[in-house]
Image (tube, rainbow, N blue to C red):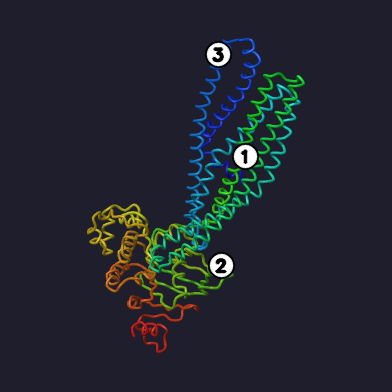
């Protein structure tokens, strides 16, 4: 994992190297100060050498000004490196999510995914900047201080530095408990984010059902769990901090006692004792940096681990010799197709299905809920993979066709229309991102939505709000149909496209859909049987598979037919 983390430094290696060089210079500046102080105390003050005292004072001022500049560079450009690495990780994660199969989103909450993209990577950014810098400076300052101190007195230095291995040993033993505590804290924060995302998305429903207290109770429960796991993490962190502070104080006490005894017995002079005390402050500084680094390591590496967990999830893969198709007639054949959402071990939603849909025809899928009609439609563009059997398009197994090419020729209009936060024009243009304004307007006219758009103050530049909340169901549906007109697919799937609309709006949209269906292979999933009477073939599907098929008239002639019963029930 460390190697994987380091790989994100490569694109920013020049800036990172410059930042580390500045850090080395700061460490060098700090190492000069005790030497100058030693000379002042032992030589220039006792011998009243004012000239050298002034030169030293000016030199120290120059060193401090240089440190000021270097610290600004470290603080600014070091954070820039962290921000850029964070942006790279977020970009890679977002692109990876775009390739994930539908099954991934069936199992993971939107808010939890957002938490990994935003919260987790913020801590990774801090680690990316401060981690190498603190580690490098800590090691450099410890080595530099050790060399300088041994030049003063070797035995005293060995006595003082004998405490440091115990500090390191303690930090290492604390690592596991802190890592687990911070991981649980991250996971619970993701749960809270998921809870908030769901609650805000469904705010209209909760208000309509006066369920605010219920939502408050749900949130409070998750919030209290987070409070407990975060308290545990902070307990571990507090234990670590207090113990490290004690070790630092004990180290300082060791210097005072040992140094005082060495001075008392004449092993060191007053200037060397003063320099020793100053250098020990520099030993304490990298120890404090190490404490800060350890905290960042727990937060940052926990976030990075959660980042890699998603990055390691398998994405949708095309076969090695996948082909791209330029022209599609629309002949679709299901051969012994079986599918379950849990894979081979799950309950079959579709079992050994055989179905042939001829190019240019309209086929309606009807039957009770849970029969697999929508699932069947999702298998055609390979949103899910079949457990067994195969689906062919114009005689070619769809697994041999690249997903991009396959989906390019398939259009879907569903009951639950999703509009992106943006303008009406941007949402229609989603059907063809290269379309110009005239093509977008033409698509809107075909979908019977142009006149309404032009009645709005901002026309096509009207903001639709989150998920199209500023528009009615019929208006959103017609925008989605305009989007499909712009895409101009060879295969059209209408999944309950008008079931949530009133009769008048349904009639208007049905006209648009009829116009859209011309010259294409159309698969219609419908519970309103009035919308499928004119289909070339109606297929009745239940949990056992296909139980009836034929035209409306043929199915109505069956004395005890399921379709006839459903139709009679709806229009009794």
Query: In this image, 462 relative to 84: left or right?
Result: left
Of callouts 2 and 1, the N-terminal one: 1
* Closer to us: 326 or 254: 254
Q: Position of residue 318 (x, y in %)?
A: 51, 57
Q: Nearer the viewer, mark 3 or mark 1?
A: 3
Q: Position of residue 218 (x, y in %)?
A: 50, 63
The relative height of residue 304 versus residue 480 in the rendered view (above or below) is: above
Place residue 324 in its image quadrant: bottom left
Q: Secondary structure at mark 1?
A: helix
Q: Kindly report which numbered mark, 2 or 1, lies closer to the viewer in this rendering.
A: 1
Q: Earlier in the sequence, mark 3 or mark 1?
A: 3
Q: Secondary structure at mark 2?
A: helix
Image position, residue 54 (x, y; %) = 55, 13
Q: Which numbered marker is on residue 291?
A: 1
Q: Which residue is mark 2?
A: 343
Foreground: disc 2 or disc 3: 3
Residue 572, compared with residue 105, is above or below; it is below
Spatial separation of the CA atoms under disc 2 and disc 3? 81 Å
On screen, residue 503 versus residue 310, left or right, reads: left
């Amino acid at each position: 994992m460390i190697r994987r983390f380091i790989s994100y430094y490569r694109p920013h290696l020049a800036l990172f190297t410059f930042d580390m060089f500045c850090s080395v210079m700061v460490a060098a500046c700090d190492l000069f100060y005790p030497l100058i102080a030693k000379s002042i105390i032992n030589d220039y003050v006792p011998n009243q050498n004012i000239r050298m005292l002034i030169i030293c004072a000016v030199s120290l001022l120059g060193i401090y000004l240089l440190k000021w500049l270097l610290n600004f560079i470290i603080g600014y450009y070091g954070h820039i490196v962290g921000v850029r690495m964070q942006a790279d990780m977020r970009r890679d994660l977002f692109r990876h999510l775009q390739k994930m199969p539908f099954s991934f989103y069936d199992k993971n909450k939107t808010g939890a995914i957002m938490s990994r993209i935003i919260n987790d990577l913020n801590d990774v950014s801090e680690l990316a900047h401060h981690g190498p810098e603190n580690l490098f400076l800590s090691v450099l300052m410890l080595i530099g201080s050790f060399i300088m101190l041994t030049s003063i007195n070797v035995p005293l230095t060995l006595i003082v530095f004998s405490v440091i291995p115990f500090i390191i040993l303690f930090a290492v033993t604390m690592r596991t408990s802190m890592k687990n505590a911070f991981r649980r804290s991250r996971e619970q924060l993701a749960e809270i984010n998921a809870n908030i995302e769901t609650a805000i998305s469904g705010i209209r429903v909760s208000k309509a059902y006066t369920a605010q207290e219920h939502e408050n109770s749900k949130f409070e429960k998750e919030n209290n769990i987070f409070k407990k796991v975060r308290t545990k993490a902070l307990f571990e962190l507090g234990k670590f901090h207090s113990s490290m502070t004690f070790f630092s104080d004990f180290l300082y006490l060791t210097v005072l006692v040992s140094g005082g005894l060495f001075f008392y017995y004449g092993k060191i002079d007053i200037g060397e004792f003063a320099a020793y005390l100053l250098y020990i402050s520099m030993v304490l500084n990298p120890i404090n940096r190490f404490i800060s680094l350890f905290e960042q390591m727990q937060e940052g590496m926990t976030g990075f681990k959660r980042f890699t967990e998603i990055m390691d999830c398998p994405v949708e893969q095309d076969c090695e010799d996948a082909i791209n198709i330029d022209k599609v007639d629309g002949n679709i054949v299901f051969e012994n197709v079986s599918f379950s959402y849990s894979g081979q071990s799950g309950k079959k939603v579709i079992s050994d299905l055989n179905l042939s849909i001829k190019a240019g025809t309209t086929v309606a899928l009807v039957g009770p809920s849970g029969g697999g009609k929508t699932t069947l439609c999702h298998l055609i563009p390979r949103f899910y993979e079949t457990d067994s059997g195969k689906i062919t398009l114009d005689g070619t197994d769809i697994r041999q066709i690249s997903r991009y090419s396959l989906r390019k020729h398939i259009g879907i209009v569903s009951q639950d229309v999703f509009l992106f936060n943006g303008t009406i024009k941007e949402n229609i243009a989603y059907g063809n991102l290269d379309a110009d304004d005239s093509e977008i307007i033409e698509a809107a006219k075909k979908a019977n939505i142009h006149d309404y758009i032009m009645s709005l103050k901002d026309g096509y530049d009207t903001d639709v709000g989150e998920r199209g909340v500023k528009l009615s169901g019929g208006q959103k549906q017609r925008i989605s149909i305009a989007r499909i007109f712009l895409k101009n697919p060879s295969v059209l799937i209408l999944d309950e496209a008008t079931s949530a609309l009133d009769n008048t709006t349904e009639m208007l949209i049905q006209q648009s859909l009829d116009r859209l269906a011309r010259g294409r292979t159309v698969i219609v999933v419908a519970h309103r049987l009035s919308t499928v009477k004119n289909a070339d073939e109606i297929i009745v599907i239940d949990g056992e598979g296909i139980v009836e098929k034929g035209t409306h008239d043929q199915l109505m002639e069956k004395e005890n037919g399921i379709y006839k019963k459903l139709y009679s029930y709806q229009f009794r």
